[in-house]
Image (spheres, rainbow, N blue to C red):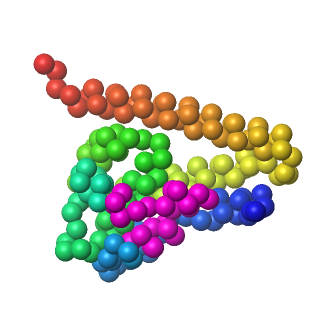
């Protein structure tokens, strides 16, 4: 069992690789899955990325097709971002966000994503209890879950606004 200090350390230190630290050689699917396991942090094995999920993201247009059977740095950056957003947003909502990004800015979008993730994880660390009191842990879980819900609702409302803004008036 992890201690609270282990959890805080993980939340403080574990981050996806910077753009420049992403592999600069193309990877096969099994290599991508192994690499993504280090990019995405979860205490639950059901959160692991699968080949079927990657293929669905390509089929749904969230990621470009591969060159041959190899995945580039751009694929890994998109996949990292998609996997985090997928925890909260639908594939359709993520697709809309990707469409909204200016072309040829994936590196900047990825680094912005990392900056926001770092800031928010650092903020969460401060809210993790300092002791194992079950009542305090339960309270923290409820606060984190409700904050996640509130953020999800806000994100959905903003996505709806983006959808309305890009729909031409008839």
Residue 6 falls in image quadrant? bottom right
**Left or right, 8 with reference to 81:** right
Inspect the magenta stretch and tell me whether residue 42 lies in it: yes
Q: What is the chief secondary structure element of the magenta stretch?
A: helix
> From the viewer's perspective, is 94 left or right of 41?
left
In percent of the image, x 36 and y 57: which residue is there?
A: 53
x and y, in percent, of residue 106 in the image: 31, 59
> Looking at the image, is 143 positioned above or below residue 165?
below
The percent position of residue 160, horizontal first and vertical second, equals 35, 28
The residue located at (53%, 35%) in the rendering is 151
In-image side of 165 versus 155 (left or right) = left
Q: Nearer the viewer, residue 57 or 147?
A: 57
Q: Is residue 101 shown to the viewer in this render?
A: no
Image coordinates of residue 131 in percent, x first then y, are 85, 51
For the C terminus, the quadrant is top left
Q: Residue at 43% x, 48% y: name it.
A: 86
Quarter occupied by the N terminus: bottom right
Please report the bounds of the magenta region as a residue range: 32-54
Q: Nearer the viewer, residue 101 or 139?
A: 139
- Residue 83 among magenta residues: no
Check the image and report above or below for 28 versus 86.
below
Q: Where 9 falls versus 26 (above or below)?
A: above
Quadrant location of residue 118?
bottom right
Q: Position of residue 46 (x, y in %)?
A: 52, 56
């Amino acid at each position: 069992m992890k201690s609270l200090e282990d959890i805080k350390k993980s939340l403080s230190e574990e981050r996806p690789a910077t753009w420049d630290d992403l592999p600069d050689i193309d990877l096969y699917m099994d290599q991508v899955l192994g690499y993504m396991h280090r990019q995405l942090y979860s205490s639950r094995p059901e959160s692991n990325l699968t080949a079927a999920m990657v293929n669905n993201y390509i089929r749904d247009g969230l990621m470009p097709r591969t060159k041959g059977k190899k995945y580039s740095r751009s694929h890994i950056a998109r996949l990292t971002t998609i996997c985090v957003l997928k925890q909260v947003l639908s594939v359709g909502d993520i697709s809309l966000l990707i469409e909204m990004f200016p072309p040829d800015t994936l590196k900047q979008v990825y680094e912005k994503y990392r900056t926001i993730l770092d800031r928010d994880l650092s903020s969460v660390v401060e809210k993790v209890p300092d002791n194992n009191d079950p009542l305090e842990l339960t309270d923290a879980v409820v606060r984190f879950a409700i904050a996640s819900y509130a953020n999800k609702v806000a994100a959905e409302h903003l996505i709806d606004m983006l959808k309305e803004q890009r729909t031409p008036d008839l």
